[in-house]
Amino acid sequence: MDYNEVFIESKKRIAELFKDKKSEQNLDLRIPPGQHLTENFPVLDLGIKPDFDKDIWRLQVSGLVEKEVKFTYSELLKMPAVKLTADYHCVTHWSKLDVEWKGISFKEFIKYVHPKKNWKFLIQFGADGYSTNVAREDLEKEHVLLAYALDGKALTKEHGWPLRIIIPHLYGWKGSKFLNGLKFTAKDEPGFWEVRGYHNRGEVTKEERYG
């Protein structure tokens, strides 16, 4: 499946525009440096929005795990669920406050997959061809969620159904939409935007936008 090259090029131009500039501090301490508030929830993706059929969709977990496994959508819904209200920050400089998610905490989820002790990175894969890498120490923080609901309703196509990872202290691109694959690894594997000039970690308060 081909990517939306126009969208990709526009994002790369944003990276070039901002990577050598320092953002001004916002007086509101809740708003990270370089961010502005939005009441809407802009939709950014690769221009590809895959369909979702709950009867055939699977989340494949591979790599450094005791046993590779595929979870059905119904199996995920049966896992202990939590709600998370957190601010969401996009690398393109907008922030939305108090976004309400529902799903499975990452700390709870790994009880079902039993990763090996030597894993250091989690590589996420989306059904749209997307990928991104996150270090273990970021995933083991509080409030990391495999989310399947937004504002009390199941995720829609626009917001990355049926599953996406939410990591509030990192920019939004570090959590894949349309999630259908997770790989636990000992070595880093930079993902779609990381190999196109974006920062390898993406911590919000440090403005780790571009490499």
Image: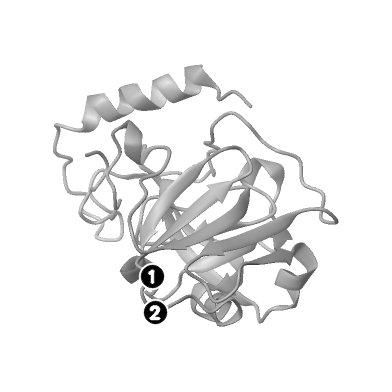
Disc 2 on helix, strand or loop?
A: loop
Residue 97: x %, y % from top left = 45, 57
The type of residue carrying mark 2 is Lys
Residue 189: x %, y % from top left = 37, 49
Q: Residues within 10 Å of mark 1 (few under 14, many from 20)?
A: some
Q: Kindly give the residue lying farthest to the right in the view shown.
A: 55
The type of residue carrying mark 1 is Trp
Q: Quadrant of the N terminus?
A: top right
Residue 89 visible in the snapshot:
no
Cα separation, mark 1 vs mark 2, equals 6 Å
Name which residue lies at 56% across and 82% down. Answer: 111
Which disc, if any, is residue 185?
none
Q: Nearer the viewer, residue 157 or 4?
A: 4
Residue 15: x %, y % from top left = 29, 30
Q: Quadrant of residue 141?
A: bottom left
Which disc, if any, is residue 119?
1
Q: Which residue is mark 2?
A: 117
Name which residue lies at 66% across and 59% down. Answer: 59
- Horizontally, residue 127 falls left or right of residue 154, namely left
Residue 119 visible in the snapshot:
yes
- The vertical placement of 142 against 184, above or below, is below
Q: Nearer the viewer, residue 158 or 164?
A: 164
Q: Residues within 10 Å of mark 2 (few under 14, many from 20)?
A: few
- The vertical placement of 132 against 79, above or below, is above
- The vertical placement of 130 against 81, above or below, is above
- Horizontally, residue 77 falls left or right of residue 7, namely right
Disc 1 on helix, strand or loop?
A: loop
Q: Quadrant of the C terminus?
A: top left
Q: Quadrant of residue 143?
A: bottom left
| CB contact under 8 Å: marks 1 and 2 | yes
